[in-house]
Amino acid sequence: MNTKYCPMCKMTKDIGEFWKAPARYDGLRSYCKKCSSAENRKNRVYFAKYNRERYKNDEKFRDSVKLKTVKRTKKMGDVYVVVCEAVKNGIIKRGRCIICKSSKVHGHHKDYNKKLDVIWLCPLHHRRVHLGEIAV
């Protein structure tokens, strides 16, 4: 069986057109990659709007978001300063993007507790890593 039916676009497609889902009986998601992506985009837009409205109207939610943001950005800011100083003082050397070899790079941390353990990525690949599209 090398094909599967997508109920969203109502087409039978090759199994390579479906994302893997180990928990399902056939090991594949119900919808094809194209339909799944469209559905995810639609949900992302919906929840962005939902959370903006909730942020405006729900004081408890707003306070919790602010607290999380302050904690995260404080930690990231501290690490950013340490890395900049280390590069300036020659402790670590700014490299090239590990994917495309571009010289315009950002430092990416897998663990903010390891301040000088940096992976160098161009802005495009850095964004894609944070979106979960690429694993490094």
Image: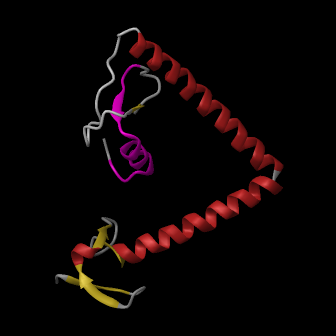
Q: What x and y, as percent, mark residue 97? A: 30, 36
Q: In this view, does 74 lie above or below 3?
A: above
The colour scheme of the drawn protein is secondary structure
Residue 29 figure quarter: bottom left
Question: Along the horizontal axis of the image, is 17 left or right of 69?
Answer: left
Q: For residue 2: magenta?
A: no
Q: Which residue lies furthest to the left in this view?
A: 1
Check the picture and name the quadrant holding the C terminus: top left
Q: For residue 133: magenta?
A: yes
Q: Which residue is depicted at the point 80% across and 47% down?
A: 60
Residue 76 figure quarter: top right
Q: In this view, does 133 lie above or below 88?
A: below
Q: Which residue is depicted at the point 46% across and 19% down?
A: 84
Q: What x and y, as percent, mark residue 68? A: 65, 38
Q: Which residue is depicted at the point 75% across and 60% down?
A: 53
Question: Along the horizontal axis of the image, is 93 left or right of 62?
Answer: left
Check the picture and name the quadrant holding the N terminus: bottom left
Q: What x and y, as percent, mark residue 113? A: 46, 23
Q: Residue furthest front?
A: 103
The front one of 53 and 89 is 89
Q: Which residue lies furthest to the bottom in this view?
A: 10
Q: In this view, does 53 lie above or below 74?
A: below
Question: Along the horizontal axis of the image, is 50 left or right of 105?
Answer: right
Q: How many marks?
A: 0
Q: In this view, does 87 lie above or below 43?
A: above
Part of the protein shown in magenta: 116-134
Q: What x and y, as percent, mark residue 98? A: 26, 36
Question: Along the horizontal axis of the image, is 101 left or right of 125?
Answer: left
Q: Which residue is depicted at the point 75% across and 49% down?
A: 61
Residue 126 figure quarter: top left
